[in-house]
Image (spheres, rainbow, N blue to C red):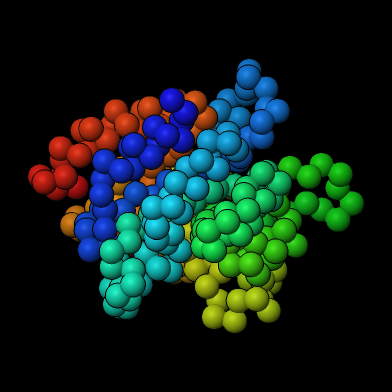
Amino acid sequence: MSLALLAIIFLSQFSFKANDREIPILGFHGILDAKAPVIFSPEESLHYPQQDLEELLEDLVRNDYWFLTTQDLYDFFLKKVKKIPKEYLKKTPIMLSIDDGHRTIHTNLLPILYKLEKKYNKKIKIVLFINPGTFPKRKSKSLTHLGCQELREGLNHGFYDIQSHGMNHKNLTKLSSQAIVYELVQAQTKLRECTKDLDPQKKVASHFAYPYGAYNQQVKSYVSKYYLSSYLYNDKILSLACRKNLYEISRLAVSRGTSFLELIRKSEGMYQLKSEVKC
Ligand SMILES: [Zn+2]
């Protein structure tokens, strides 16, 4: 059984609908292509195989999932300042996020998004948490990360929701106040500079994901000065029944190989908890 199929089984256990109280937010890193080596580095273990991702996305599209942006989650579910449009009420909401802006998003994922749009006439939205400090320098030959132009292409086609992951992917709990502010403000400024003409409402870099998922009270209070909400990794499904903290939004980490099996195992526990609503 492929990983993607297992993932679908996992997700289908929760027949979330927009009115329900739990929303899975998946967190990916890079996307491996078919030629990726079987033996991999610890960093690559976080990356997800392209073919599995394609199968997963195709199934989600076929089953008419609602791909949330960070602003959708904020407006419709967290702050509830907007009413869910009728046509979305029966859909199952999910958020797909990818951290760190690896170039494989452009080379291995974007083509799938175009392909599935053509096939099903539906647009998949992917939330990208980006560190603009990793934009390739002008003369650099090592293209490991996305540049501004590539981000603009995905944004212009309506596939990307571009959000902030800090300027240089620093562990914010280890920085001085001044350095935290620099990481938060500089990332927002650079991402908005890159997308200015395509994003008149400044939706870009309004939301944040803590690098390494690391945060504390001080970090949270600085983030809340510059961003509307913030995401972490805690392997929990976001429960709307619980006290909602805009700066502690739950995500499920997805990594190469074992993670969906782990998620399935965990999901059994979580499914039972659903009626008890443990927060
Ligand atoms: Zn990261």
Name which residue lies at 52% across and 73% down.
203
User: Which of the pair 91/93 is nearer the observer?
Assistant: 91
User: What percent of the width, then of the height, locates residue 53?
Assistant: 53, 41
Name which residue lies at 63% across and 35% down.
32
Q: Residue furthest right?
A: 139
- Residue 276 in view (yes/no): yes
Q: Where is 90 relative to 269, above or below? A: below
Q: Residue furthest top?
A: 39
Q: Where is 127 relative to 47, above or below? A: below
Q: Where is 94 relative to 203, above or below? A: above
User: Which of the pair 218/267 is nearer the observer?
Assistant: 267
Q: Residue furthest left?
A: 276
Quarter of the image for residue 157 reads bottom right
- Residue 234 in view (yes/no): no
Name which residue lies at 33% across and 68% down.
88
User: Which of the pair 211/273 is nearer the observer?
Assistant: 273
Name which residue lies at 39% across and 56% down.
65
User: Which of the pair 28/159 is nearer the observer?
Assistant: 159
On screen, residue 233 versus residue 84, left or right, reads right
Q: Which quarter of the image is occupied by the N terminus?
A: top left
On screen, residue 27 versus residue 245, left or right, reads right
Q: Residue furthest front?
A: 119
User: What percent of the width, then of the height, locates residue 163?
Assistant: 54, 61
How many callouts does the rendering have?
0
User: What percent of the width, then of the height, locates residue 117?
Assistant: 58, 59
User: What percent of the width, then of the height, locates residue 221?
Assistant: 39, 61
On screen, residue 64 versus residue 255, left or right, reads left
